[in-house]
């Protein structure tokens, strides 16, 4: 294992989650052990929140639970500064210790710095728990972030509400990207139009990692996006073709009954086990190679969801 350069070991460690470094430094040896230990001693996970209220732009950054300014991060070794999430908020009240700055500084310095520091497990989250993000501000964020989809953003999770055509354009670019291992979470603020459904179908094509969910939103569209038989059929068709090493998880709002789930057409190499009396909310689909896809219905009042994943090992 020590036949590879130390720089290669460091590059590999840069793609591993922070919590794994301690364990790896205990079980590895030589250069690999040294690289894991180097990251364990020095890595800094940082979260960025950005906002605009009454025309004033600003941000907040947290490193190991402590607030820190963009300027204080600049002297640190950038190899070990990793941005785990970028949150787009509506107001500074959703940021504990906000730093006001000009719009130019936010978009030309702060955001690019954190994009460049994004880890393989980072995410972009439009965060509306504290109030709606104004449409015009959302468009500014989306237009800026879109330019980084293929340069800087890595294996990133996207959690996005609906802000009109700009949201559709952003997801289209996200799905069309050459990255094959990105997660996608939409919600019921999205309308269930043919154009939006086509975007979801495009995301559900075979890839190394599929992780898709439709959440509930406070500002629900009248004909809101939800799982239906078309998306379920695409889910099964894709899963029927995947290598066992691929990650596969799909779910979201569901307004139909169990009979509708049971009526979804199956690919030729897939069979369905009838629900048992004590598992009336669970369906198991099985491929010819023995792989099983689990589907269960859950309730979070007043809504119903379906959750589909490849195996118990992939249930989080």
Image (spheres, rainbow, N blue to C red):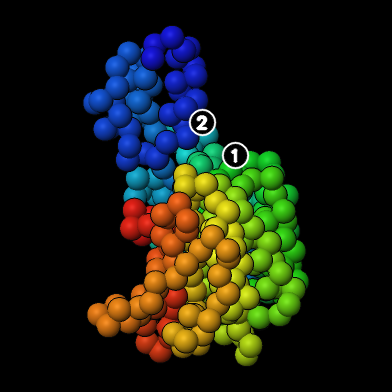
Can residue 105 be seen here? The reply is no
CA distance separating discs 2 and 1: 9 Å
Residue in view at x 45 percent, y 23 percent: 10
| Quadrant housing residue 265 | bottom right
Q: Which mark is residue 150?
A: none
Quadrant (top left, top right, bottom left, bottom right) of the C terminus: bottom left
Q: Which residue is mark 2?
A: 78
Viewer-closest of 269 and 139: 269
**Badge 2, how many Cα within 10 Å: few under 14, some, many 20+?**
some
Viewer-closest of 165 and 293: 293
Residue in view at x 25 percent, y 80 percent: 278
How far from the left and from the top, in percent, is residue 309?
A: 43, 62
Viewer-closest of 224 and 102: 224
Query: Is the residue 42 above or below the residue 283 in the image?
Result: above
Query: Is the residue 26 above or below the residue 271 in the image?
Result: above
How many marks the image carries: the answer is 2
Q: Which residue is mark 1?
A: 116
Residue in view at x 48 percent, y 12 percent: 5
Query: Is the residue 24 above or below the residue 231 in the image?
Result: above
Can residue 242 be seen here? The reply is yes
Residue in view at x 51 percent, y 42 percent: 120
């Amino acid at each position: 294992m020590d036949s590879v350069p130390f720089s290669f070991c460091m590059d590999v460690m840069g793609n591993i989650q922070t919590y794994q470094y301690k364990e790896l430094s205990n079980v590895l040896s030589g250069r690999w052990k040294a690289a894991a230990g180097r990251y364990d001693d020095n890595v800094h996970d940082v979260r960025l929140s950005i906002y605009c209220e009454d025309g004033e732009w600003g941000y907040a950054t947290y490193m190991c639970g402590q607030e820190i300014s963009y300027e204080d991060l600049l002297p640190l070794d950038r190899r070990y500064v990793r941005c785990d999430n970028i949150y787009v908020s509506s107001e500074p009240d959703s940021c504990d210790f906000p730093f006001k700055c000009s719009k130019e500084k936010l978009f030309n310095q702060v955001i690019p710095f954190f994009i460049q520091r994004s880890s393989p497990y980072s995410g972009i989250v439009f965060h509306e728990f504290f109030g709606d993000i104004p449409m015009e501000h959302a468009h500014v964020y989306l237009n800026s972030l879109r330019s980084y989809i293929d340069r800087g953003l890595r294996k990133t999770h996207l959690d996005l509400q609906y802000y009109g055509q700009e949201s559709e354009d952003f997801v289209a670019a996200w799905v069309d990207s050459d990255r094959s291992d990105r997660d996608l979470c939409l919600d019921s603020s999205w309308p269930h139009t043919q154009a939006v459904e086509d975007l979801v179908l495009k995301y559900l094509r075979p890839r190394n990692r599929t992780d898709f969910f439709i959440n509930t939103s406070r500002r629900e569209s009248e004909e809101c996006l939800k799982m239906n038989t078309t998306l379920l059929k695409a889910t099964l068709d894709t899963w029927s073709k995947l290598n066992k090493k691929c990650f596969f998880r799909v779910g979201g709002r569901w307004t139909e009954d169990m009979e509708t789930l049971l009526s979804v057409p199956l690919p030729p190499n897939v069979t369905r086990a009838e629900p048992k009396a004590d598992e009336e909310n669970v369906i198991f689909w099985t491929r010819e190679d023995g792989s099983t896809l689990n589907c269960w219905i859950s309730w979070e009042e007043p809504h119903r969801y379906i959750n589909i994943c490849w195996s118990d090992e992939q249930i989080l």
